[in-house]
Amino acid sequence: MKILIAGGAGFLGSNLTRSLLSQGHEVVVVDSLSTGSRDNISDLLSHSRFYFYEMGVETDEFVNEFIVNDGRHFDYVYDLACPTGVPNIQYLGEEMVDACSVGTKNLLRLALKHKAKFLLTSSSEVYGDPEVFPQTEDYTGNVDPQGWRANYEEGKRFAETLVSLFVKKHNLNAKTVRLFNVYGPFMNLRDQRVVPRFVTQALAGDPLTVHENNALRTMCFVSDIVRGLQLVVDKGMQGGIYNLGSDQELNMKELAEKIISLTKSSSKINFVPGMILDHKRRMPDLSKIHTLGWKQTVSLEKGLKLTIKDFKKRMPVVPVHGTVQIKMA
Ligand SMILES: NC(=O)c1ccc[n+]([C@@H]2O[C@H](COP(=O)([O-])OP(=O)(O)OC[C@H]3O[C@@H](n4cnc5c(N)ncnc54)[C@H](O)[C@@H]3O)[C@@H](O)[C@H]2O)c1
């Protein structure tokens, strides 16, 4: 099959790309590299079934290359293209709304042109600060359209609206997954999400910075998510929305302690003020994705060990006064 992955040089996209290549498919990645990295795919650039285009999906360049001119056929279009990371809601806010509006619409047009199956990776952020636990897919959320997190939250909600429009108006075979926290190899070392932050801090011997609200989160390993994305795009209902992630909650202090223990680090835990409007708790209802036969298979301990192994390989470290310090280029 011929597959386009928008955002394929990011954390999740590069894991999905590897999985699809290993299954014998041809993969075209389009990525602006705003939060992704060429390093994530550098070993694939010489692969005979892999093609990389550095460009934003919201640009005229993308429209000309893939919609106006291109003769290349696609069987699947995966839309993972969106800057991520809470600090980037401020720094890359406009890029977020562009990717989720013009970018997603361009990708939907492309899928329509080729009658390709389409999958949007939306987010648990569409539920905002939920008043309902666990969150089922029909819960419409609690989001402030003017709020500090709106660029991402409302961006994803609008991208979902576009998918729904193309299903209803054009009968496109499109689906949406709402991802809850995912972690694993190929996360950006500078990523401020909790697993990369704690792992880099632990490996450097620095204190692990747990936000004072000690939020509850669920964590799902990336290989389970990649399997879930493929399952939904192939077996999900047309126009269907599926929560995807883990429903096993833990607080951030527990996660920090686990990472300290698995890295055998001497780091301590420091409680620090949280991010603006950080959500205290989120929890997916997974009944719908379970009906497709999906279940989480990788334990937190196993997933963290694989993640730590990958981070150790990629983190440049120099010894300083008997400890180690990360040297970020
Ligand atoms: N990882 C998670 O826990 C999680 C949770 C919820 C939702 N998601 C969603 O899953 C998708 C993948 O997330 P990730 O964790 O791999 O993050 P990521 O930042 O590593 O990947 C996103 C990729 O999209 C690229 N990108 C951004 N804007 C683009 C544009 N306009 N055109 C082309 N490429 C663009 C980035 O450069 C990056 O490579 C995102 O849409 C994200 O919102 C992820």
Image (cartoon, rainbow, N blue to C red):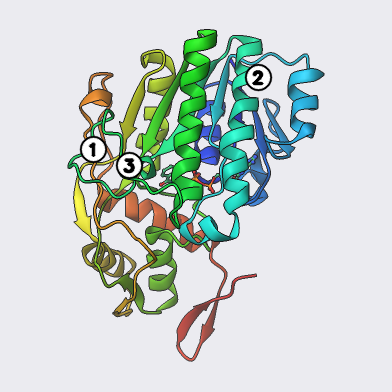
Q: Is residue 111 left or right of residue 307?
A: right
Q: Which one is earlier in the sequence, the residue at label 3 or at label 1?
A: 3
Q: Position of residue 150 (x, y in %)?
A: 46, 49
Q: Which one is earlier in the sequence, the residue at label 1 or at label 2?
A: 2
Q: Position of residue 168 (x, y in %)?
A: 47, 12
CA distance separating discs 3 and 2: 28 Å
Q: Residues within 10 Å of mark 2 (few under 14, many from 20)?
A: many
Q: Quadrant of the N terminus?
A: top right
Q: Is residue 125 left or right of residue 114?
A: left
Q: Is mark 2 within 8 Å of ligand 1?
A: no
Q: Position of residue 161 (x, y in %)?
A: 47, 27
Are the residues at dot 1 and dot 2 in contact (C-beta closer than 8 Å)? no
Residue sitting nearer the eye, 313 or 77 = 77
Whether residue 8 is visible, yes or no, is no
Label annotation for residue 110: 2
Label annotation for residue 29: none
Q: Which residue carries the number 3 mark?
A: 127
Q: Where 311 falls versus 235 (above or below)?
A: below
Front of the two marks 3 and 2: 3
- Please state which amino acid type lies under the numbered disc 1: Gln
Q: Residues within 10 Å of mark 3 (few under 14, many from 20)?
A: many
Are the residues at dot 3 and dot 2 in contact (C-beta closer than 8 Å)? no
Residue at 74% from the left image edge and 36% from the top image edge: 59
Are the residues at dot 3 and dot 1 in contact (C-beta closer than 8 Å)? yes
- SS at mark 1? loop
Q: Quadrant of residue 62?
A: top right
Q: Where 212 falls versus 60 (above or below)?
A: below
Label annotation for residue 135: 1
Whether residue 18 is visible, yes or no, is yes
Residue at 46% from the left image edge and 20% from the top image edge: 164
Q: Residues within 10 Å of mark 1 (few under 14, many from 20)?
A: some
